[in-house]
Amino acid sequence: MAADNIRVSVIGACGRMGREVVRAVMDAADMELVGVCDVASVGLAAAQACGATGSELRVEYDFAAMLDRARPGVV
């Protein structure tokens, strides 16, 4: 990903709207998915849990820890 891409984290990533947002971010040329957070599917690959492809990110439960690690520009 390019350095000027928008770094995005998604809260509620495994819900109906969250899955759509994850897919949209992953398909966007100017965005980078840097974190996914949900109470469901914790530990699963985001691609598997959200029905997307191409991400090695894992679904996290701890929102504060995810923010600290991922440093997103947008949540």
Image (cartoon, rainbow, N blue to C red):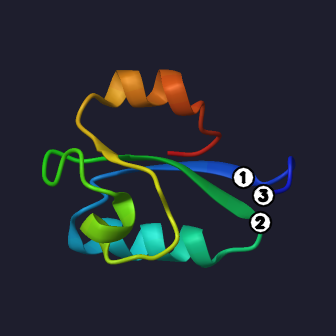
In the image: residue 68, left or right of residue 30: left
14 lies left or right of 23: left
Q: Which mark is residue 1?
A: 3
Q: Position of residue 10 (x, y in %)?
A: 42, 52
* Rendered image quadrant of residue 61: top left
Q: Along the polypeptide, which appears first: circle 2 or circle 1?
A: 1
Residue type at mark 1: give it: Ile
Tell me how many marks there are: 3
Residue 22: x and y in percent read 44, 67
Q: Which mark is residue 6?
A: 1
Residue type highlighted by circle 3: Met
| Label 1 vs label 3, nearer the camera | 3
Residue type marked 2: Asp
Give percent across and percent down for residue 58. Answer: 36, 48
Query: Which residue carries the number 2 mark?
Result: 30
Spatial CA distance of label 2 from label 3 is 8 Å
Which one is earlier in the sequence, the residue at label 1 or at label 3?
3
Q: Secondary structure at mark 3?
A: loop
Which secondary structure, mark 2?
loop
Kindly indicate the quadrant of the structure image that contains residue 33: bottom right
Mark 1 Cα-neighbour bin, 10 Å: few <14, some 14–19, many ≥20: some
